Amino acid sequence: MVDTNALRAEMSRFGITQKAMAKILGVSEKTFYLKMKSGVFNTDEAQIMVETLHITRPADIFFAKRATHKVAI
């Protein structure tokens, strides 16, 4: 799941609105909004955002952990 708060912060740092990012990704504003709401983007979209926003640690944003739990082995 994507850390949408961190992604919004990166977009804000560059002054890129959701509308502008939707256009950069080639999706509608509604589709981008829904992707932000669900926290799910495909790898091509993630790569475009990493390059556009110059994200140096993409795993922190695009592979964020929702919750941690221990698994017994």
Image (tube, helix red, strand yellow):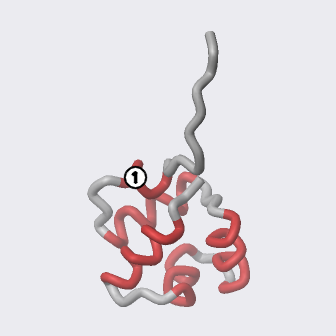
Front in this rendered view, residue 29 or 24: 29
Q: Residue at x 64, y 76 (%)?
A: 32
Q: Secondary structure at mark 1?
A: helix
Q: Residue at x 50, y 59 (%)?
A: 46
Front in this rendered view, residue 19 or 9: 9
Outermost residue, top side: 73
Q: Residue at x 66, y 79 (%)?
A: 33
- Can you say whether 38 is above or below 33 in the image? above
Which quadrant does the C terminus fall into? top right
Q: Is residue 67 left or right of residue 53?
A: right
Q: Is residue 37 left or right of residue 48?
A: right
Give the total of numbered labels: 1
Front in this rendered view, residue 68 or 37: 68
Circle 1 residue = 60
Task: Measuring from the top left, give residue 35's x and y in whole percent.
Answer: 67, 69
Decide: few, some or many residues near mark 1? Use Cα within 10 Å; few <14, some 14-19, many ≥20: some
Task: Measuring from the top left, give residue 21's x and y in whole percent.
Answer: 51, 81
Front in this rendered view, residue 67 or 1: 67
Q: Residue at x 55, y 58 (%)?
A: 2
- Res. 28 image quadrant: bottom right
- Can you say whether 69 is above or below 49 in the image? above
**Residue kind at label 1, given as amino acid type:** Asp
Task: Measuring from the top left, give residue 15's x and y in whole percent.
Answer: 36, 89
